[in-house]
Image (spheres, helix red, strand yellow):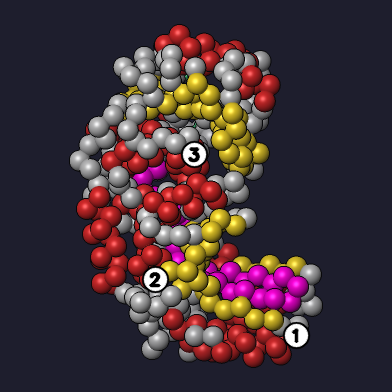
Amino acid sequence: MASTSSDESLKLFAITAPGLEPVCAAEMAALGIAGTAEPGGVAWTGSVDELYAANLRLRTASRVLVRVAEFNARSFIELERHARKLPWERWVRKGGAVRLRVTSKKSKLYHEGAIAQRMLAWIGERVGGLGATEAEKAAADETEETPGAAQLFVVRAVRDGFTVSADASGALLHLRGYRQAVAKAPLRETLAAAMLLGCGWDGTAPLLDPMCGSGTIAIEGALIARGIAPGLASADGQPRAYAFQQWPGFDADAWARVVDAARAEARPSAGVPILGSDRDAGAIAAAAANAERAGVAADVELSVRAVSAVEPPAGTGLMIANPPYGVRVGEGDGLRNLYAALGRTARERAPGWTLALLSADRKLEAQAGVPFREVLRTSNGGIPVRLVAGEV
Ligand SMILES: C[S@@+](CC[C@H](N)C(=O)[O-])C[C@H]1O[C@@H](n2cnc3c(N)ncnc32)[C@H](O)[C@@H]1O
């Protein structure tokens, strides 16, 4: 059976949410990987070790794909000729489950469902049969962290040019495993990390989230400050599960090497104050449970208090928040006062600090009275948002 040897060069792509590509490329550069930011992610050519490390260590990527093939096909006969030649047994075991995500644009073969159906049949023939549960698994929510979930292949046709990629991640990478308790409108872990890294926060200055909800920004901050890989953010320090571990060619030695190298970089404590507060006691209880599960409970100081009652620690640092927008957590006119209170509190209690906000509304953000610059644009739960930051 074909294996994936650790010196083989693979064509790799880390998918990110739109707008996070440069942050992810900078993360990769810090890992010694020279990637190229493209719309939707970062491309690079690398080894199996890099594939494993990217999954384990990138804080802002949603998933990592391995390019399987690129070819042109204008008919099902041509598609069949190419698809049957591919070494599917590298990524799928006999009896394994597969799901395909097909998109076709400006191509002769435009029927995405028909492409998926035929390719599933060819993959099944090549590996000696797919599992009986493939139909149910195909319908399953892709974010589910089901052990042994169906292997995803992403097939894109643009002007008759096909690219086929195998998903190496499995459950989306924002699912570190620690956040089981959620408050209202939680932020994806990948976006929380991108907010911090995008602001240039590297874990060496104090951090305060005065509207921390379930604690995502503070917890991601503690992971950065301690150098803990997102895939190791668990109370017992064990890595989460990845699709590549199910591949027949999985290189357990390479994986052990990558995990050991990541563990060796972790520091025993954060070294800077990391504070999270929220006026909602239920949110703080959720944040505390999440911090515990992430293995950073001792690094994050959580308290129930209103924005206007925050007490920033000595020194200058980053005050960063994901305030309610009014779209998802509607609070009407009170929101204007909330943004104004945030700006006032920052000016009065945290002079010299940077204030950063994830903003969906320029008028609301202007209430803070801080000269903001735009750090990045992305979307959060389908809402277009900007991360803005300014000195107070
Ligand atoms: C969009 S949620 C933050 C979600 C958080 N980033 C997470 O990942 O769970 C906004 C939070 O602001 C809090 N909040 C609203 N008004 C507040 C105030 N005046 N003082 C403190 N917290 C407030 C809410 O309780 C809510 O948890």
Task: Tell me what residue is drawn at x 49 percent, y 75 percent.
Answer: 97
Labelled disc at residue 47: 2
Are there few (<14), some (14-19), or many (20+) residues within 10 Å of tag 2? Answer: some
Q: Please provide the residue range marked out in magenta.
A: 151-179
| Helix, strand or loop for disc 1 | loop
Q: Earlier in the sequence, mark 3 or mark 1?
A: 1
**Secondary structure found at label 3:** helix
For marks 1 and 2, give the one nearer the viewer. 2
Q: Specify the amino acid type for callout 3.
A: Gly
Apparent side of residue 127 relative to residue 204 in the rendered image (left or right): right
Q: Place residue 302 in its image quadrant.
A: top left
Percent coordinates x, y for residue 335 in the rendering: 61, 18
Q: Amino acid at mark 2?
A: Ser
353 or 162: nearer the viewer: 353
Among the 4 quarters of the image, the one containing residue 361: top right
Reading the image, the residue beneath label 3 is 198
Disc on res. 75: 1
Report the side of 155 relative to 254 (left or right): right
135 is higher (above) or lower (below) than 18: below
Check disc 1: other Cα within 10 Å, few if <14, some if 14-19, many if 20+: few
Disc 1 marks a residue whose amino acid type is: Ser
- Image location of residue 68, percent across then percent down: 53, 77
Residue 276 seen in the current view: no
Tell me what residue is drawn at x 72 percent, y 86 percent: 76
**Closer to us: 190 or 283:** 190
Please identify, in this view, whether the residue under mark 3 or under mark 1 is nearer the observer: 3
Residue density around tag 3, few if under 14, some if 14–19, many if 20 or more, within 10 Å: many
Residue 39 percent across, percent down from the top left:
62, 55
User: Which mark is first along the chain, 2 or 1?
Assistant: 2
Does the residue at mark 3 contact the one at mark 1 (Cβ under 8 Å)?
Answer: no
Q: Secondary structure at mark 2?
A: loop
